[in-house]
Amino acid sequence: MGFFSDLFSKQNCVFCEQQVGALSRKKLKDKTYICKECEKNCSAYIDVSKFDNGFISNHIEYMKKHNILYEKEVAPLDKSKKERFVSGWDGIIFVDSIGMFEVISPKYNKKNVKELFRYDQIQDFNYYNVENTSTGEGQKKYSESGIEIIFRCPIDENGWTNNQVNGGRLHPYVPKIRIPFEKNTDDANCGGLAKAHLNKLFGRASESLLGSIKEDFTGTGKERAQFKAGVDSVKALGNLAKAAIRKDAEGLDDAKNEMKNVATDMFNATFNFGARYTSIADEAEKRAWEE
């Protein structure tokens, strides 16, 4: 009887306190409820039922700030300032000038708030494919094919603590996003242009023939950054030695700071190439939130 009485009863949304029926609400982890309208203030990429109302309350505040960020930093931009890769109803829009991107999907389009993801929150990305279990004429190998983006996130998709997070900028709520670029296809590498942009952002080798030929001469973005960091380190060591010989205390301090910056650049070029967008994203957030 408990199940049926709950199913047909009216319940109050813990956020707006409106009474809602079973078809217009979701039960949260702590057995409180959120209505459909309040759920529209949450990310399209989390399952709210995996969390309690305290967690979701903090998440809604986070999303409100992101909506402000979008309205101030993305909405005014000309289309030429955005790299848009969309197939059908799904896709991704890169905004390199602020070091962030937006994911497009039918579910996201129904939300009340806009959502942005920082480049430096990305831990990895790759193609993904869903095997087609249907049979019949016209059925292809994959029911869905696209790009998967994995974030450094302290929680997994089930709301449990994730202990496999590498160092770097964390996304507090979303562990993974899948962007389907094709449905019912034999192509295992759908979304290639979007992935090419990700490869460029993170200094990975090009997967195109022309890009590979060019990189044979110039190196990948990551390799070029490592080379530059190496050159800068030699220069910084020279400045340090000169200041020591001259017994120039002020120059010595400047040279030591230069060495610290070079060491950071070398680390980022080698282990966390996308971190060069951290300061860009930080500045965008400060402008938007007037911090």
Image (cartoon, rainbow, N blue to C red):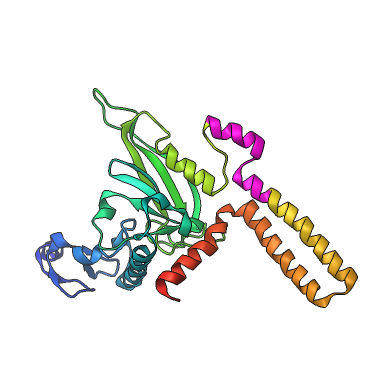
- Note whether 259 is above or below 213 in the view shown: below
- Determine the residue located farthest toward the right in the rendered image: 245
Q: Nearer the viewer, residue 236 or 198?
A: 236
- Note whether 110 is above or below 10 in the view shown: above
> Which residue occupies 54% across, 64% down?
279
Occupied quadrant, residue 47:
bottom left
Q: Is residue 96 visible?
A: yes
Tell me where residue 29 appears, x and y as whole percent. Answer: 30, 66
Q: Quadrant of the N terminus?
A: bottom left
Occupied quadrant, residue 128:
top left
Give the side of residue 281 with respect to residue 135, left or right.
right
**Residue 138 lies within the magenta run:** no
Occupied quadrant, residue 53:
bottom left
Highlighted range, magenta: 209-226
Give the side of residue 268 with respect to residue 174, left or right.
right
- Note whether 22 is above or below 271 in the view shown: below
Q: Is residue 99 visible?
A: no
Tell me where residue 160 appears, x and y as whole percent. Answer: 41, 61
SS majority, magenta = helix
Q: Nearer the viewer, residue 130 or 250?
A: 250
Give the side of residue 35 with respect to residue 167, left or right.
left
> Which residue occupies 44% across, 39% down?
193
Give the side of residue 49 with respect to residue 215, left or right.
left
Tell me where residue 234 appears, x and y as whole percent. Answer: 79, 56
Q: Nearer the viewer, residue 121 or 287?
A: 287
